Image: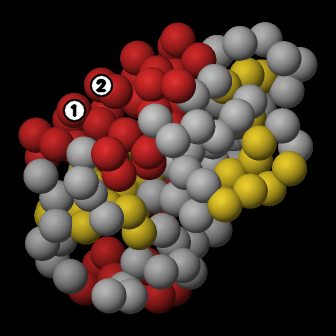
């Protein structure tokens, strides 16, 4: 089985706050027991090359990835840098052609069911997840990774 996953779900310290995400035992066992070939992606770290770094959020939640806007919490726009890295990572996922895509929910980049839009949690996808959704992938997260 080929799995594409958010780097932070593998315990890599790539998050904005520099902290390691704690992952459920179920997900750890799934990754270990499925004899999977795993490739990890973090478009946000690829864009900013540092962790910790200032947090980002979505400005809006349009239907198309091309129309997304993302900013630091102090309102500096960061859409261009993130769009470049998210599209590069999405192309790499397409080339890899995984059986399962598992992304960290809640992130303005990787979120698949809920995202922070200007400080308000809304149902929707982050930019990387939206690009993969538009490419036809089913996006799982750390909670629903083993659901049909
Ligand atoms: Fe990187 Fe995605 Fe994890 Fe954010 S949620 S730290 S963009 S892998």
Residue 31 sits above or below residue 82 on the image? below
Disc 1, SS: helix
Is 55 on the left or on the right of 113, as rendered? right
Residue 20 visible, this angle: no
Q: What residue is rendered at 16% in x and 67% in y? A: 99
- Residue identified by numbered label 2: 88
Q: What residue is rendered at 74% in x and 30% in y? A: 59
Q: Provide residue 141's location: percent of width, then percent of height.
A: 48, 68
Q: Residue furthest front?
A: 63
Q: Provide residue 148's location: percent of width, then percent of height.
A: 32, 88
Q: In terms of depth relative to the viewer, which is nearer, 89 or 15?
A: 89
- Residue identified by numbered label 1: 91
- Look at the numbered disc 2 and say if its residue's Cβ is closer than 8 Å to ligand 1: no
Q: Quarter of the image holding residue 55? A: top right
Marks 2 and 1 close (CB-CB < 8 Å): yes
Residue 47 sits above or below residue 122 on the image? above
Is 80 on the left or on the right of 106, as rendered? left
Residue 99 visible, this angle: yes
- Look at the numbered disc 1 and say if its residue's Cβ is closer than 8 Å to ligand 1: no
In space, the residues marked 2 and 1 are separated at their CA atoms by 5 Å
Q: What residue is rendered at 80% in x and 56% in y? A: 121
Q: What residue is rendered at 16% in x and 43% in y? A: 94
């Amino acid at each position: 089985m080929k799995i594409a996953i958010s780097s932070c779900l593998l315990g890599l310290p790539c998050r904005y706050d520099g902290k390691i995400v704690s992952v459920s035992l179920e997900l750890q066992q799934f990754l270990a027991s499925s004899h999977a070939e795993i490739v990890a992606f973090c478009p946000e770290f690829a864009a900013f090359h540092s962790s910790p770094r200032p947090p980002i959020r979505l400005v809006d939640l349009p239907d198309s990835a091309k129309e997304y806007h993302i900013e630091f919490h102090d309102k500096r726009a960061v859409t261009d840098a993130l769009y470049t890295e998210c599209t590069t990572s999405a192309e790499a996922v397409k080339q890899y052609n995984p059986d399962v895509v598992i992304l960290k929910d809640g992130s303005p980049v990787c979120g698949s069911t809920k995202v922070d839009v200007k400080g308000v949690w809304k149902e929707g996808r982050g930019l990387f997840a939206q690009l993969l959704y538009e490419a036809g992938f089913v996006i799982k997260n750390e909670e629903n990774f083993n659901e049909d």
